Structure formats: C-alpha cells, structure tokens
Amino acid sequence: MTCPPAGDGDGRAPISVAMTGDVLPSRAPLPASEAERHVFAGLYETLVRLDCDGAARPGLARRWTAYDGGRVWRFELRPAARFWDGTPADATAVIASWRRSVALCRLRGEPDPFLRFDPRGDAVAILDRDELLIRLRTPSDNLPLDLAHPALAVVGDSDGRGWLAGSGPCRPEGSPRGGELTLLPAAEHPRGPSWPRLEILLIGEGTDARDLLDTGLHAVVDRSRRVHDYYAGRRLVDVLELPWDRWYYLIAPEADRRWTTGWEQRVLAREIGDALAAPADFSAYEPPPGLCTTLRAATPSLVPPPLPETEDRPASDENLILWPADDPEAGALAERLATVAARPIRDDDIPGRGPLARPPEPSPGDRPTALAVDPSALGAHVQQDPIGAAVVPWPRRFARPCDELARLLSLAAWLQAIALDGDAATEAVPPGARPAQFTDAAAPGSALAAMRRLERERVVQPLVRTRAFVAARPSIEGWDWNLDGSLRLERLGRQD
C-alpha cells in the first residue's frame, strides 16, 4: 500500500464522520473499538508515530539519538508541549504515563507493551524538562518503533469531564452523548487541524451504514464488506482501504486438538479474498536476519467470569469455541469453525493427503458450539484454558511482525510451555505477578520459531487478516493514516 496524497483542503468548515463502535473516555489511551482507534490517535500522542509506510515520525518527541551502540537513547520532546488542560506534557509526565500504562495493560489483559525496558525502574531518567534518557537491557537499533504502541500514548490527569488530558492535535468537547462526539482543534498544538469542528456519529457494530452519506454526513469509517461494496459501486464516493490492522487466530488449548486436526487453513477459515479480508499465514512474518524479538514471560493470569448460559450450550466447556461479542468477524469465523468441527471429515477435503478416519457423530450435548463472551474476558478464558478453542482478534500494536508474535506468545503461560518445548524454562506466572522478559540475545529468532511450532502442533492457527475502509464525499481531502490504520483526523479538509 502506498501513502495517500496529502491534499490541500482548507478545512475551515465543519466535517462530519460516522464511525463504528462506542468511545469510552475511561479506556484511554488504549483503544478497544474501531471508533476509539481513530479518536484516541487524535487526542493522545506517542513519542513516535509510524506513518503508513512504517517510518518513524515525530510525535510528542521531535528528535531522538542513539548512543553506546543502541544501548542508550535520548529523546527530546516538543518544547513547551502542554496537555489541553494547560499542564506541561514534559518528561515527568511521560514517565508517569508510561508507569500507568503497565497497570492499564495488566487490567485489560493486554500483554506488556514494553519490549526492551521497564519504565518503573531506573531505565528511564529525566535529563531536563523536555529530555529523557532510556537505557536498554540489550542494544536496539529500532527502539523508536516500539514507542508507537498506543498504550504508550502520553496522558495527563483527569480534565474533570471524564477524559484524561491529552497533548494531541485534537481535543474533545465534552463526553460522548447520544451516540455523538465532537472534536475541536487543540489550540497549542503545532500540527492542529484547520477545521473548526469534527462531528463524529458513533454507530453500533452490525449497523447498516449504507445510507449514511445520503443523510448529509461527509464520510463513513466501517469494516463491513456489504457497506464497502455498496459505496464502491456508487459514483461521487471515494472509497479508501486502510492498512491491514487486525489478525484473527484460532487458539485451541484442548489437548487432542480435534478442532484443527486434519483441516487445511482454507477449510478452517472461510474462502475469502476481497478488499477487506484475506487469508493470513505465518509466511508473512519472516523477519530480516537479526531483527526478531526474544520471548517475554506471559501476562499475569486474570480470573475469568462465568461463561454465559445459553439453551444450546454443550455439556462440556471443551466443546466451546469462544469469540468476543463485539466483533462480528470473529463471530462468523467461530460459527464456521463450529460447523466444520461437527461434521465428519471427507477424504477429498485435503487433496493429496489420502483417506482420513471419520470421527464419530457427536451427541447433541457434545456438539461444538460458538459462544459469544464479553470482549474483556476473552483473554482470561484463554489463559485458564478450560475451553475447546477461541477465535482471538489481534489488533496491530507494533511495527515489526515478529514483535507481534512475541506479544501473542505472552498471552498465556501454557502457550509458551508448548511453544518452547523444553528450549527454555517457563514457569506459570501467578496472578498479580510482574511480567518479565527473556533476555537471550543469542536466540533472536525465538519468537518466530516458537510460533511455527505452535502452528505445527495445531495450537494456534492464523485465519484471516482484515482492515477498515473509508467512504467519503470527494469534497473531503487530506486522508492520511498511521501504520496501524488509525486515521490522522487533523489532516482532513473540505473543498466545498
């Protein structure tokens, strides 16, 4: 994908955009919905942002320098940067925010975002109001890429309206009300928007957005293929596909792996290949030599809530395929997988493999069932592994694919126990324990090797990757985005 043209819209008129999902200020700065992904990117700044080609660009930091072979890094912040409540967004605020992000990720079940240093110790030091120093455990040529993780966006204290103060180019006008949110330019930001207001209409998952541009809105951001194809066939509507930003994995903790044994990926996943979804496999993760992250210890286990009771729930939880209730794509995949797992395997399902044993027809109480669960609890259910399988959406957080594999492997201790297979000692992390990192620099490809072992063992199967799109009136210009597909809303402008 190539970067879009910047456009030259003057942007002096208000702009209205519809986005999928809700926006909860309490979840900032780590997004959980499609709308939060774009809104939080405009409100909160990471030190470094990654443009659509993956190059590091200034965020809250204006420049950075490596010393001692990449073991020490100095970051210079934007001079006199402030949060929208007027308080300084300085080096002290950066460290306080990063320490908060460790607790935030643990609370949310998100793997630790700090790959190479711990901000709670002496690895981070303040040199001046606008300068900080980071000392790494092992040298790195690419530390700035790690700092674009959305959880590392710098936040201040509560602004009294439910929001944590941010230093980004946009600021909110009050809290979301009635499915609407208004963003205003942040007056002190040097790259603030030229539009006076950005009106955001928040629409629910699964809502048909095909007629929204006819109601006077300027743009729609969505993930639905039906909506995409509708607007792609209309005149006077520009349709832009955003970068691939979400992977779906089938994670099967059950020992006999009956969910995956004997099925090709094309049978497990749906036969798809369009503008918004494509088959995914680990071949896309082959890293350049020497650039692969070593493994980290697993995220501390969370206690999962009871599974929902439904009329068709099977007799055993090992017959369940869980999926997050707010993700229709995951639900469609889980339903398809449950259907596949329930039927006998045909000899012709896997060309060239020869006859396969036909499994016995399951009794009604033992039929595989797809079950929706609270999105925040999905990771806890996977960590405790009482289930048959789970379809896990995996939003992109890091620039390098191998870092994403290390992040996925840190989701659960039992995943690492299987993946490492005796290559390294991994103990289960007790609840509340502090995550640690493996520091074996002699095995730079360990994350990729471990993931390939999990695939061979049919423990983790990559299913599909997906992305969002924008449908907009031609009068809206300046569309731009970051590597993770989050929009740079401050760049928008109108030509009418």
Image: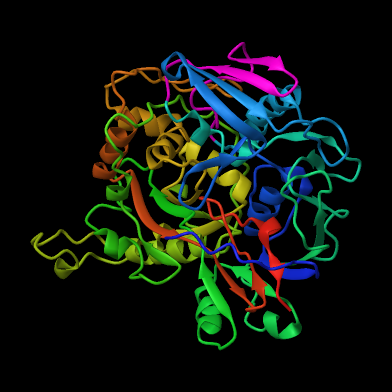
Q: Nearer the viewer, residue 295 or 324?
A: 295
Judge whether 179 appears above or below 39 on screen.
below
Q: Nearer the viewer, residue 61 or 143?
A: 61
Residue at the extreme right of the image, as rendered: 160
Specify whether 125 is left or right of 277: right
Judge whether 350 appears above or below 134 on screen.
below
Q: Residue at x 59, y 86 (%)?
A: 236
Q: Main secondary structure of the magenta part?
A: loop
Specify whether 280 is left or right of 353: right
Part of the protein shown in magenta: 111-140
Quarter of the image with the C terminus in it? bottom right
Q: Position of residue 17 (x, y in %)?
A: 71, 69
Specify whether 464 is left or right of 305: left
Specify whether 26 is left or right of 297: right
Q: Nearer the viewer, residue 353 or 287?
A: 287
Q: Is residue 214 visible?
A: yes
Q: Position of residue 117 (x, y in %)?
A: 53, 20
Judge whether 215 appears above or below 110 on screen.
below
Q: Position of residue 18 (x, y in %)?
A: 70, 69
Is 125 one of the magenta-colored residues? yes
Q: Is residue 203 visible?
A: no
Q: Position of residue 349 (x, y in %)?
A: 19, 67
Residue at the extreme bottom of the image, as rendered: 235
Is 243 one of the magenta-colored residues? no
Quarter of the image with the N terminus in it? bottom left
Q: Nearer the viewer, residue 339 or 358?
A: 339
Q: Residue at x 49, y 27 (%)?
A: 115
Q: Residue at x 70, y 67 (%)?
A: 493
